[in-house]
Image (cartoon, coloured by chain):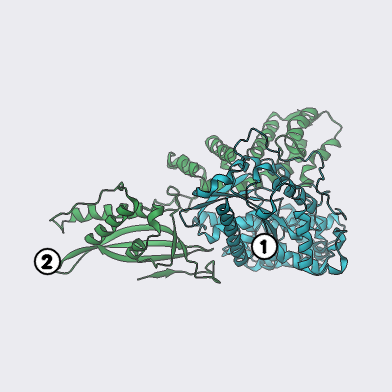
Amino acid sequence: MMKEQQPVEAFSSKNSSSGVCRIFSLVVGDPMKEGKGLGAKTTYLIQTEVVKSGFPETRIVYNSRKRYSDFKLLHDECRKLTSSDFKTIFPPKSFKKFNEKLIAERKEAFQHLLLEFVDNPVLLNNQNLKLFLSIPAQTHLVPPSKHKDIPSSVKFKFSSVLKNEEMKYTFKQFLIEEHNIEPFEFLESCFQIQKQGSILIEEFDRLVIQEFVEHGSSREINIDNRTRNLKNTLSTQTDLVMWNGQLESVLQPATNAVKLHLKTDSFPRFVYNWPTFKQFLSSKSDAFIASITKGSPDSQQALIFV
Amino acid sequence: MGNIVVSPHDKEGQHHMMATPTSNNPNGGSAATAKNKSEITVLLLGAGESGKSTLFKQVQFFHGVGITHDQERIELIEIVRLNVLENAKNLVAATQHLNIPIEQPENRETAKLIINSLNTNDLEDPSWSKRLYSLWKDAGIQKAYENREKFQLYDSTEYLFENLDRICSDKYVPTVVDVIRTRTKTIGITDMKFDVGDGKQLRLVDVGGQRNERRKWIHFFNTVDAVVFLTSLSEFDLNLYEDNGYWRVKESLRVFNEVVNNALFYKVPFVLLFNKRDLFEKKIATKSFSKYFSGFNEAEEKNPVACIEYMTKLFLNEITEHPLDTVSVKTLSAIDHDNSKQVFEEVKQFIMTQQHRE
């Protein structure tokens, strides 16, 4: 019943007993007529794909076949446990048991119901539910991740948060939530100065060094000691004004460092873990998404939590 | 760097990082209400490079929060390779600063390319594995590496160079150990919730540790149910990333003092984790520990237990306000999965028991 896909270097090779699995997808399909005459019934195939924790992770697909009355029993039990109704209405009994339309509707409803069950923390690790899905009892399930909108082939470019105004705005909101807006404001200030083409040394000192770079400055950025010493480069200059060429050589070590930190630390969390970004994306056109990503988006796969 | 015993009330003036909470934080000591809360907030605190995010990643992994997104995985490849390049750059720069020439001419060529043009995509080419490894084994680079306390270098340098043959390949997929070993400086504050059974959720908060980052910690001080403070055992010969003239141990003690004695945490269970025990044991085998601590008996300096005991005293001496019976001290090697799991389990138990006593 169970097929394992490439068990490459499972995370906990030493302690395989800790079976922590996240549900990756759950699909009800392949209705099949079994038996004849009065005993005839329709069964539905339930395929639950789980991701076993580890890196790289192992994917396991569990298959199980159930009929209408099995679903009914599970549904009643789940309703008792949660003492509330589900959004999906349980399909009523019908005499036209083998009507194709009816079967398709039931299949759909069963799938939505099961998704609601696994989405409910009270039910997720219920033994009857696991038994129903043919998932071993000792497996500890964790909820599916909520990233439903992004096809897995999409790669978001960090540069998009610097270039695209809407992305920039969204990323800044994220940084404010993480209490980390300073590095971005530093980049914006540097960009502003570069756009002007020149700046009085005095102004530069006030707007950049005293604001972002010096120890204890009000919006101090997190850079190493050597990079921080961009002020030293500055003090060797005897001019009153700095021009574009100079500006770049003075600012680049710090802006590069800051970009790198944002790119490697904040940006992945922004893209993969921040719910608001998902909402933002779901309101966007494909063209917009293409403009902020590399490669072409996958055709949307149904009901996969990626 | 100091051959001194740090005095507990050593304030260097300008680096004051956290305002002591005043009356504008009326709901101080939130643990009193924590007993029946379904969510327990645990802060991971500590100075820079003490291992907060490493522990955070481990906790994520053993709670089944992994990496599903293929693209996230590809991004990790880049981050690992960026680490390789940063390490190589830092080592090459160090040979300049320390005036130790790279010996072999072909390695000098490699060094030049690393500084000027090499990027992460180049590392797909397996020939870089040989070139970088040869550079790593160059007598000049090795000598700089032996003197790594004189500049800033990641703990994972050796590990990455020893694994170049895997990393420099177009088939490279990072392993969990690679991900754990990769250094990414945390900036800002991030959190994640984990289901810990009994209908309870653990909310773990990870923060950046450098001075400027610590000003942000205060945002979470009101809502805390427990604090886990990390400090690196192996930092006794190192200076700060953000301030090269400042001894890391002194900084850690200062931060610990300000956190543990903070009025908001009086009633909160407090765990002190001495991290990087693995590195520490390797380090004291070759380096003098007593050189940095005048109060420590030189005859004992190769004995890790004695050294850790001394460090423990040093830290516990900082506690002036927090009730000692709600402080727990443990050692940790956060890069070790099993050890992290065990220690974190103990930490969880300690926090739960403390809350039941309330």
How far, Cα to Cα, is label 2 from label 1? Answer: 66 Å
Q: Position of residue B57 (x, y in %)?
A: 59, 57
Say what amino acid the circle numbered 2 marks.
Leu
In the displayed structure, A175 sits above or below A5; it is above
Chain to which the residue tagged by mark 2 belongs? A
The residue lying at 31 percent from left, 52 percent from top is A112
Say what amino acid the circle numbered 1 marks.
Leu
Callouts 2 and 1 on one subunit: no
Residue at mark 2: A38
Q: In the figure, the green chain has which letter?
A: A
Residue B76 visible in the shown view:
no
Q: Residue furthest front?
A: B357
Residue B333 location, quadrant? bottom right
Horizontal side of residue A134 vs A263, given as left or right = left
Could you say whether the residue bearing mark 1 is in a helix, strand or loop? loop
The residue lying at 72 percent from left, 30 percent from top is A197
- Number of marks in the rendered image: 2
Residue at mark 1: B332
Colour chain B is painted in: cyan
Q: Position of residue B88 (x, y in %)?
A: 73, 59
Could you say whether the residue bearing mark 2 is in a helix, strand or loop? helix
Tag 2–tag 1 contact (CB < 8 Å): no
